[in-house]
């Protein structure tokens, strides 16, 4: 019986972590038969994102066209969490992720999830937990997961070939492919993650052998915990 932490491998994980944060599910889903995925987690890992998960939820719900589940969250959990004791801080956290853009109607604010360090951290956690759940190799170190918003179309044949899973299709859907048997591919697995039907992210889990031979500069390009500010500078 494997009772090691799914995220760091510590023996005797004392807690169970919901791989997909529970807070993404509005009250109307609370009695549904959807089985929420849980994995063993040590207390330090489990607690380390307890503050980032509400932020993750808030940014995701604001980051695109709302579906019915998002509207329900806005009217309930999100609204409440912005009004509770930490609410002001949470609001300013979200506000800090918004960037003004000029539109014909004047200045508007848009959220850029791809530059939100805390959101990306929870996204990597989801992938690491799923890696464990699907009995791929684990524990996957945080830095070995690369996450970004999906910025390009993926050929339909490729997407169709990937197995599809969902935890309530209007909340979270995902697909993945494993490349471990192909020596010339640096990824161990690739993931498409869709939240609330239209917020799409891509995640890559590198092979440990590939990751081990990267230079520090390359690590900053490929790593999950890359320095985003530094990357922006080198791109400009
Ligand atoms: Zn742990």
Image: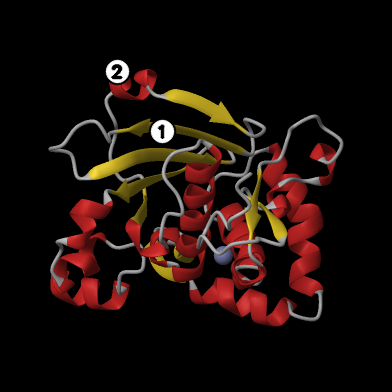
Q: Nearer the viewer, residue 145 or 53?
A: 145
* Vertical position of residue 231 compared to residue 120: above or below: below
Q: Position of residue 54 (x, y in %)?
A: 67, 64
Q: Which residue is mark 1?
A: 176
Task: Identify the residue at the far front of this view.
Answer: 1
* Vertical position of residue 71 compared to residue 108: above or below: above
Residue 221 in which image quadrant? bottom left
Q: Residue at x 41, y 44 (%)?
A: 137
Q: Where the C terminus falls, by quadrant?
A: bottom left
Q: Position of residue 90 (x, y in %)?
A: 65, 75
Q: Which residue is mark 2?
A: 157
Residue 66 in which image quadrant? top right
Rendered image: mark on residue 137: none
Which quadrant of the frame does ligand 1 lie within? bottom right
Q: Where the N terminus falls, by quadrant?
A: top right
* Vertical position of residue 35 compared to residue 84: above or below: above
The colour style of the image is secondary structure
């Amino acid at each position: 019986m494997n009772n090691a932490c799914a995220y760091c491998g510590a023996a005797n994980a004392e807690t169970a972590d919901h791989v997909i944060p529970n807070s993404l599910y509005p009250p109307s889903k609370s009695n549904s038969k959807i089985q929420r995925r849980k994995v063993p987690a040590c207390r330090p890992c489990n607690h380390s994102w307890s503050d980032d998960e509400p932020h993750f939820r808030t940014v995701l719900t604001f980051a695109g066209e709302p579906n019915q589940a998002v509207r329900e969250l806005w009217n309930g959990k999100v609204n409440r969490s912005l009004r509770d004791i930490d609410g002001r801080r949470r609001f300013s956290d979200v506000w800090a992720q918004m960037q003004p853009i000029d539109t014909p109607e004047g200045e508007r604010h848009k959220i850029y999830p791809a530059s939100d360090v805390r959101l990306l951290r929870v996204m990597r956690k989801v992938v690491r937990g799923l890696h464990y759940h699907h009995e791929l190799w684990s524990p996957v170190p945080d830095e070995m997961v690369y996450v970004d918003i999906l910025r390009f179309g993926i050929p339909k044949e490729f997407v169709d070939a990937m197995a599809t899973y969902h935890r309530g299709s209007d909340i979270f859907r995902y697909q993945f492919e494993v490349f471990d048997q192909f020596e010339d591919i640096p990824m161990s697995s690739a993931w498409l993650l869709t939240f609330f039907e239209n917020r799409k992210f891509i995640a890559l889990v590198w092979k440990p052998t590939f990751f081990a031979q990267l230079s520090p500069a390359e690590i900053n390009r490929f790593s999950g915990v890359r320095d985003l500010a530094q990357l922006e500078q080198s791109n400009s």
